[in-house]
Image: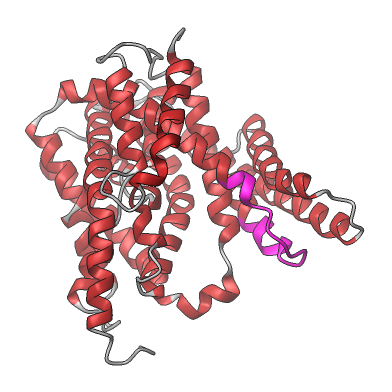
Amino acid sequence: MTWALPVIAGVLLAFAAISGRITGTPISAPIVFTAAGLIFGMHGAGLIDVETASETVKLLAEVTLALVLFVDASRVDLSALRHQISVPARLLGVGLPLTIAAGFGVALLMFPDLGVPEALLLAVILAPTDAALGKAVVTLPGLPTRVRQGLNVESGLNDGICVPLFLIVLAIAQAESGAIGDGAAARLVTEQIGYGTLAGIGAGVIAAAILIVAGRRLAVEPLWAQIVPVSAAALAYTVAVPIRGSGFIAAFVGGLVFGAIRKRAGGEVSHLIEELGDLFNAITFIVFGAVLLSPALGHLSWQVVIYAVLSLTVVRIAPVAISLIGMHERVPTVAFIGWFGPRGLATIVFAILIVEETDNLPHQDVLLTTAIITIGLSVLAHGVSAAPLATRYSTWCHRHPRPDPSA
């Protein structure tokens, strides 16, 4: 790992130098970082040579997801969201379960040797979406608010929803393979969800109370106000893990509680944690290209490629279309929302956790290769298409306004 950190730092500096020039182009940040990982990784220049199962990679992925989960959850404004709740509610309440069901069915079809728990595990791993891979879609002002808000809220919340599902299905798969007993699996899931929730509530309440109480007395400096949510995310995660809770569930619940309570204090305190999340996200994609995608490219099969393509198209778009039935959305809108369900950070972390937590799944290599190739394809396809398709769809919306804007 002698040159890994200098190379990663150099890549970040190089990207910073061109970041303004590539904004709005088909070259997205995840494409640049993943490509850099491939170039400098183990099958490239060999300068980023950390092992997939190393504690460093696991820690990086977990810290990144914990920060992102906390930020996404803390942004949820229930009072404002209720006016634009229909699209995200349909996507999460109907589209997400149908996506998992469709992914499960296609997995059984493409990989007949997979057991039922393993096929379901693959479907859950690839269910969460990542708005960062199609940033132009959720930031372009010309897009309809309901579409931008719908995709943004869906991406922000489905990670938190999929974490307990992942833990449950992984425990079932481990029990099926004999890695752990049925009783141990049930106890493990109960502890991770229960203790994770309690740790998150505690951290969220403490952090929000500090901002409200100390803020009223003008006892918190602006810099330290920005540090509070970072510390809250760290507190939630680090309290949950030692007591056998899920740090990810703790971070997500902590963000929900913190965001709901701290509004009384007013002001903006999320700049630092968002910037840290972006930084760690960038590093994660560099490492993803170097230590996950590079080796996976050497284990391609036609089944893996077809599943990856179907996962990003039919498995996503068909459930979205079904979930939006009755909302009078037109075909371009349904297709746009359906296409922009990129797979990214959460799937990367789930894959790393499978490597770290178990080596007893009968078809673990197939699961990991399929998930990693799907992410790689998503980074390229959604990154390249985000800006041009968002611009084209925005133009179409202005030329063809909805007959009933209030619908």
Q: Nearer the viewer, residue 187 or 209?
A: 209
Q: Nearer the viewer, residue 5 or 104?
A: 5
Give me the residue at 24% from left, 20% from top: 295
Q: Is residue 9 above or below residue 374?
A: above
Question: How many numbered tags mark residues here?
Answer: 0
Q: Nearer the viewer, residue 67 or 361?
A: 67
The stretch in magenta equals: 256-274
Visible residue check, residue 116: no
Colour scheme: secondary structure
Q: Is residue 260 magenta?
A: yes
Q: Is residue 312 magenta?
A: no
Q: Can you give x and y, in whole percent of width and height, for residue 91 in the image? A: 35, 66
Give me the residue at 46% from left, 75% from top: 85
Q: Can you give x and y, in whole percent of width and height, for residue 106 in the image? A: 16, 48
In the picture as drawn, the residue positioned furthest to the bottom comes out as 404
Q: Can you give x and y, in whole percent of width and height, for residue 26 in the image? A: 25, 48
Q: Is residue 8 above or below residue 338?
A: above
Q: Can you give x and y, in whole percent of width and height, for residue 373 in the image? A: 22, 34
Give me the residue at 73% from left, 61% from top: 262
In the picture as drawn, the residue positioned furthest to the right comes out as 217
Give me the residue at 21% from left, 50% from top: 312
